[in-house]
């Protein structure tokens, strides 16, 4: 069976793939074009897509009898794949749950601290030579320890963020979710997102992307937030209505934001880039050697199980 890996991977993952499979590895780091996605379905038995490779219903309709039988997604999020359309075409989909949890939670805390303590703004001040030295009222930010955090979604990643907030910083943890959660530390479930947004110092987005969560954080949620509060998004960009966030930051209705993802990624509006009150990272959530290798090996485990006719370890 022929495998196509659609992005360069870590050396360990590429070496294993070449040793175990008949594989082509695409050298380009950009997202697949429509023509490439059609070729993926037509010319390969297994494809390893990732974020941005939009295997939507139109792609499956364009290749009505695909050779491909497995999209082994590199990443836990799979909102770029129309799973129902894939299933109707006889194509299974897997992902990489668990491998990304701690690294993504760490990035959430990085952004929370950077936004609260104005770290990005301060670093720019030093780099451009504008820093005039320490004084008692220089760049006063917000204390994090003992504050209240609201987590939108308390799944694996949300719970890992809450754990860090509670045990590391003594924070009061609120959350919204479809059901009650018991993550092993004190949490309080809120009835709805706007109610939670009104109570917290930090609002952290940690739900999966997709039609159900698109623009979940909109004008109403941002309006409910307190003027000193910060929004942190490490999930998917389209969960936050970007235009509404820009307006809230410009008008100083919230104190700041820390973003690792963007609604129209990789495009980041100049209006957002121009704001000192927002910390911007280039989707670094899982960007460590260990985690990306673990993700790749998890994908290859799914590929190996598929080729051997075994049960898929991580079906979606």
Image: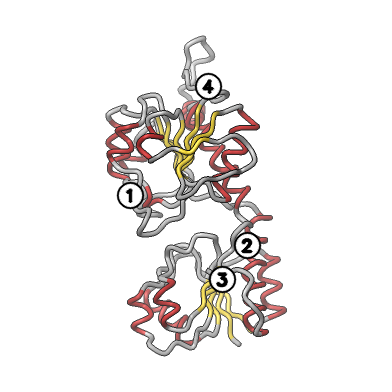
The circle on residue 195 is none
In this rendering, which labeled residue sits more in front, label 2 or label 3?
3
Q: Mark 4 points at which residue?
A: 143
Q: How many marks?
A: 4
Whether tag 2 and tag 4 are in contact, CB under 8 A, the answer is: no
Instruction: State the image quarter where residue 95 is shown.
Output: bottom right
- Residue drawn at 42 percent across, 83 percent down: 89
The Cα–Cα distance between marks 1 and 2, rounded to whole angstroms, is: 28 Å
The Cα–Cα distance between marks 1 and 4, rounded to whole angstroms, is: 29 Å
The circle on residue 295 is 2
Query: For the residue labelled by badge 3, is the local secondary structure a helix, a strand or a loop?
Result: loop
The circle on residue 215 is 1
Residue 61 position (above or below residue 285): below
In this rendering, which labeled residue sits more in front, label 3 or label 1?
3
Q: Which numbered disc, 1 or 2, marks the residue that appears first in the sequence?
A: 1
- Residue drawn at 62 percent across, 57 percent down: 98
The Cα–Cα distance between marks 3 and 4, rounded to whole angstroms, is: 42 Å
Q: Which numbered disc, 3 or 4, marks the residue that appears first in the sequence?
A: 4
């Amino acid at each position: 069976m022929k495998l196509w890996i659609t992005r360069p991977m870590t050396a360990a993952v590429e070496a294993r793939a070449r040793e175990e499979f008949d594989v082509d590895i695409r050298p380009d780091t950009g997202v697949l074009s429509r023509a490439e996605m059609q070729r993926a379905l037509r010319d390969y038995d297994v494809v390893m897509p990732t974020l941005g490779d939009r295997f939507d219903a139109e792609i499956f309709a364009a290749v009505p009898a695909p050779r491909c039988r497995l999209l082994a997604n590199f990443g836990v999020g799979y909102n770029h794949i129309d799973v129902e359309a894939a299933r109707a075409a006889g194509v299974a989909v897997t992902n990489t749950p668990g491998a990304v949890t701690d690294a993504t939670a760490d990035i959430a805390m990085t952004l929370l601290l950077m936004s609260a303590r104005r770290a990005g703004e301060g670093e720019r001040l030093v780099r451009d030579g504008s820093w005039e030295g320490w004084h008692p009222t220089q760049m006063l930010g917000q204390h994090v320890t003992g504050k209240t955090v609201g987590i939108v979604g308390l799944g694996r990643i949300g719970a890992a963020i809450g754990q860090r907030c509670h045990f590391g910083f003594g924070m009061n943890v609120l959350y919204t979710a479809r059901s009650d959660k018991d993550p092993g530390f004190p949490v309080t479930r809120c009835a709805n997102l706007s109610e939670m947004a009104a109570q917290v110092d930090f609002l952290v987005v940690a739900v999966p992307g997709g039609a159900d969560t698109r623009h979940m954080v909109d004008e109403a949620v941002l309006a409910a937030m307190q003027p000193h509060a910060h929004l942190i998004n490490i999930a998917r960009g389209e969960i936050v209505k970007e235009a509404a966030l820009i307006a809230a930051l410009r008008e100083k209705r919230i104190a700041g934001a820390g973003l690792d993802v963007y609604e129209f990624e990789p495009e980041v509006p100049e209006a957002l880039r121009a704001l000192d009150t927002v910390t911007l990272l280039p989707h670094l959530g899982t960007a460590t050697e260990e985690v990306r290798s673990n993700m790749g090996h998890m994908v290859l485990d799914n590929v190996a199980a598929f080729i051997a006719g075994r049960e898929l370890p991580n079906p979606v």
